[in-house]
Image (tube, rainbow, N blue to C red):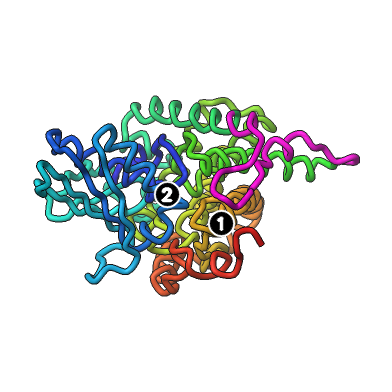
Amino acid sequence: MKSIMELYKIGSGPSSSHTMGPEKAARIFKGEHTDAEKFKAVLYGSLAKTGKGHMTDTAILRALSPTPADVAFVPEPEFVLTHPNTMDFFAYTGGRETGSMRVLSVGGGDIVIEGRQILEQPEVYPENTFSEISRLCKAGNIRLSEYIERCEGRKIWDYLYIVWEAMKRSIVDGLSVTGTLEGGLGVERKAQFLYNQRHIDESPETRENRTVCAYAFAVSEQNAAGGTVVTAPTCGSSGVVPAALRYMQEKKHFTDEQIVRALAAGGLIGNLVKQNASISGAECGCQAEVGTGCAMASAALAELFEMGIDQIEYAAEVALEHHLGLTCDPIGGLVQIPCIERNAVAAMRAINALSLANFLSNTRKISFDLVVQTMDETGRDISSRYRETAEGGLAKLYRIGS
């Protein structure tokens, strides 16, 4: 299993698979064709169906600039797609095609270039399932964060400090902005309102809900606007982990050192889903994105409170299990409705999963590994209309301007 540094990526929203991945691919292609006079990108499948709303064309044109470029959208190509997020790049000089490249954007900002040997990042974790990791931790009487340090080395902490600073910055930036998000839906930024609008007789529970949701809204709104966020595990689910951890840090006065150890545990959970299933909404729906983000946040919180390995597993399992079947149906192909609210709900659910794990882990019947497998099979069975194509659900029934 790869380093969690490959999971937590700092970059521009609104979508790791639809903006970060295509932009990365475009930069590679441009670097290989420096003499090109013109470029063309052709987007297929999910990239074509929701590319406008996800700003895919904007990301690609930005990467290929200043060379002139065109972006074409072909939702239903004549060939069979090997992945729903497929794109072709073409280079031209003197009106003649001088090069081409087919790329798959496989989720989390990662890409695969067809016909080329994948330059694999080194495997840093010998274990590939939670059960294997759990047995090793119990045998050595070590915590998940200690296991991660043994595999990654101490450099992981330096990287996670950078990640945590970026997460906190995305909250601060999101809380500082008001107005309407671009895209045509007329969605108002609500983070600042949620953060400042106290109830006349506010209980601690109401304050917790309002604050956590404000933080999740802040990050998700930044993402929707193309701002800088951290994939956790994707841009579309980037608000869940920082919202839950930032709130708990403020409430319980945890140090940044404790937070980055929690981030490591959450990253390991995300890695396991990425390794054994998918974190791509185009492959498995939103259960793969926000569901995984919720599981990551739940495990991170459990590590933060120094719960046992079984309690950490229970928290992550509960979080993911109760997102099973969650579809990806962004209205207008925009990462706004239902995505922003969904991050807030998942952040609160992560805190609920933490509470359940405190009491009920010894009653657990379902393993985290089994839920990951179930999520993968469920996602593959979901109609493509509900996998980031904006062809079903809310995306079909809601009419912009209605």
Residue 236, how many percent across, how many down? 49, 49
Q: Quadrant of residue 85?
A: bottom left
Judging depth in this view, the residue of 22 and 324 nearest the camera is 22
Q: Badge 2: how crowded within 10 Å, few (<14), some, or many (20+)? A: many
Q: Is residue 310 visible?
A: no
Dot 2: element: helix
The amino acid marked with disc number 2 is: Gly
Residue 83, position as x, y percentages in the image: 29, 62
Image location of residue 74, percent across then percent down: 31, 62
Query: Tag 1: residue type?
Result: Ala
Q: Tell me: 401 left or right of 153.
A: right
Identify the magenta region: 173-201
Q: Residue furthest right?
A: 201
Could you tell me which residue is drawn at 84 percent across and 42 percent down? 203
Residue at (40% x, 39% y) in the render: 8
Looking at the image, the residue that sits furthest to the front is 95
Q: Which residue is mark 2?
A: 270
Please state which of residues 385 and 89 is positioned toward the viewer in this rendering. Answer: 89
- Residue corresponding to mark 1: 319
Residue depicted at 27% across the width and 32% down the height: 66
Is 177 placed above or below 180 here?
Answer: above
Distance from label 2 to label 1 (Cα)?
A: 12 Å
**Callout 1: few (<14), some (14-19), or many (20+) C-alpha neighbours within 10 Å?**
many
Callout 1: SS: helix
Q: Main secondary structure of the magenta part?
A: loop
